[in-house]
Image (tube, rainbow, N blue to C red):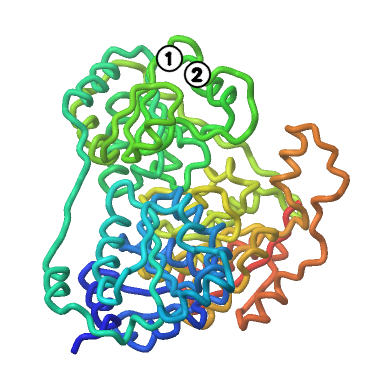
Amino acid sequence: MVTVSEAFYRVLRHHRVTAVFGNPGSNELPFLTGLPKDIPYYMALQEGAAIAMADGYAQASGSTGFVNLHAASGTGNAMGCMTNAASGHTPMVVMAGQQARRYVPVQAMLTNVDPVRLCDPLVKWSGEPLRPEDGPALLSKGLMLASAAPAGVVYLSVPLDDWDEPADEAALAHLLGRRTEAAPVAPQHALDVMVDALEHAAAPALVLGPGTDTEAGHRAAVTLAEHAHLPVWLAPSAPRAPFPTRHPCYRGQLPSAAGAVGEALAGHDVVMVFGAPVFRYHAPSSADFLPPGVALYGVTDDPDEAARAPFGRIVVADPSDALVRVAKAVPHTSRPRPTPRVLPEADTGGPAFSAEAILDAIDRGKSDDAVIALEWTSVDMLRDRLTLTRPRSLYYPAAGGLGWGLPAAVGLRLGCPERPVVALIGDGAMQYTPAALWSAVRHRVPVTFVVCVNTKYHALQEFSEVLHVPEGGYLDIPGIDVLHLARGYGMRAHRAETLDDLTEAVREGMTAEAPRLIEVRQR
């Protein structure tokens, strides 16, 4: 007899799920009784950390993340990091348990929290089996939906007494034989319009987002920029870095305010956007979205992103595929080449250092194949000081939800063990999911964590100035000892007293076999 538990793991293998991340409760323990040795289970001490580890793993490995969480309260604790997974289109199945079927009336009396409905605003689909034998089919459906464009999070809730029940073996045989394939491809006539617009534009520009951070998309973006002599921007608050930061066409990241975006793109008559929303705005502005006379064209695989764009001609399709086809079709141009930009010199005075100097020191120490997990949010607009030449080299919380970066770095290294990972974390952001340091130590995941200590909520202090809010010291966060926190979880920790010390510590981390934390003081 094949049990529901055994059937679940067969379905996971069939869909190439290679790891489970979790922070289970009592309702989830029966799922672990059948855990096979070829699918490792990575334990997190907090639910948000489990989500972020699975998020990083899925993005780095190209597989679907699978998370085992406790039901209502556990799901609630995970919601912050789940917003990043949903906004980042990370394929993920979150599976929680629920009371035994014979206890359901009692459960209804004890609580009115429904974890399935709790997740509805964030997930593509949620479900629970009507019969125990329906569970494997719902899992298969969830895995396929999670990876279907636009990829995202699905939620599955399974009663704790289902696992030892007999599976429907005939249905299981069909599940293990079926596949779905779907690649939304832009119609050629829509791309012909974009190619024609580029050929006839006087001063076109290119804006890229996470949807083109693939091997093919990265190459095509460089080819298109060089053939058409296009200045290239990243979309506002982009969670990936899909273009080389030292390329002469690169212009940096667009700001996240309507007026500021308009100013950055002033002087251009055609703007092409691939793989990003049009646009994400964070800072308030009463200015118009774009200067008059600018025509915008875009490609996204998310119909919701296309529908909410306030302007432009948007195609719903695979943005990397569209970018490859447009790059092949656009001929070399006689327009002048963009003038390479020069980054300003950093102030290297200490003992507390400028953000620019810290980033430069890290850049000197990291290897070319290093992956950056960035949750030092106050330096988002300075990320260009990092030399990034390869796709999938930088990851940032897609919805801006803090607590993601530290555990995501662990998942990134597990998902792509051949590339070293450096996590750049603010001292405030570290406090959301510090328990992920334990997971890194427990599973011996060699991530280099660089925690930048400024003893204040720097990003909000900047917004206080924008919004004309008296700051008054409310956003200071003194008294946190980062080194003792890390050592308490069993991690090697070190304070970099000089920029050279920081560079050398990062360089050593490129070949380290265990995780380590470096603290550096920022002014």
- Give left or right: position of 215 versus 491: left
Image position, residue 164 (x, y; %): 31, 87
Q: Residue at x 33, y 51 (%)?
A: 151
Task: Assess whether mark 2 and mark 1 are in contact (beta carbons under 8 angstroms).
Answer: yes
Find the residue positioned furthest to the right: 472
In the foreground, 175 or 397: 175
Instruction: Work out whether residue 491 can be spotted.
Output: yes
> Which residue is labeled 1 in the image?
294
Query: Identity of the amino acid at label 2?
Result: Leu
Pointer 2: residues within 10 angstroms few (<14), some, or many (20+)? many
Q: Residue at x 55, y 64 (%)?
A: 113
Query: Identity of the amino acid at label 1?
Result: Val
In the foreground, 505 or 100: 100
| Residue 290: mark in rendering | 2
Q: State the SS at label 1.
A: loop
Instruction: Work out whether residue 513 can be spotted.
Output: no
Find the residue positioned furthest to the top: 293
Which of the 4 image quarters holds residue 209?
A: top left
- Give left or right: position of 86 versus 176: right
| Residue 319: mark in rendering | none
Looking at the rendered image, the quarter that the N terminus falls into is: bottom left
Q: CA distance from mark 1 to mark 2?
A: 7 Å
Q: State the SS at label 2.
A: loop
Image position, residue 284 (x, y; %): 65, 29
Image position, residue 509 (x, y; %): 52, 70
Which of the 4 image quarters holds residue 205?
A: top left
Image position, residue 521 (x, y; %): 73, 59
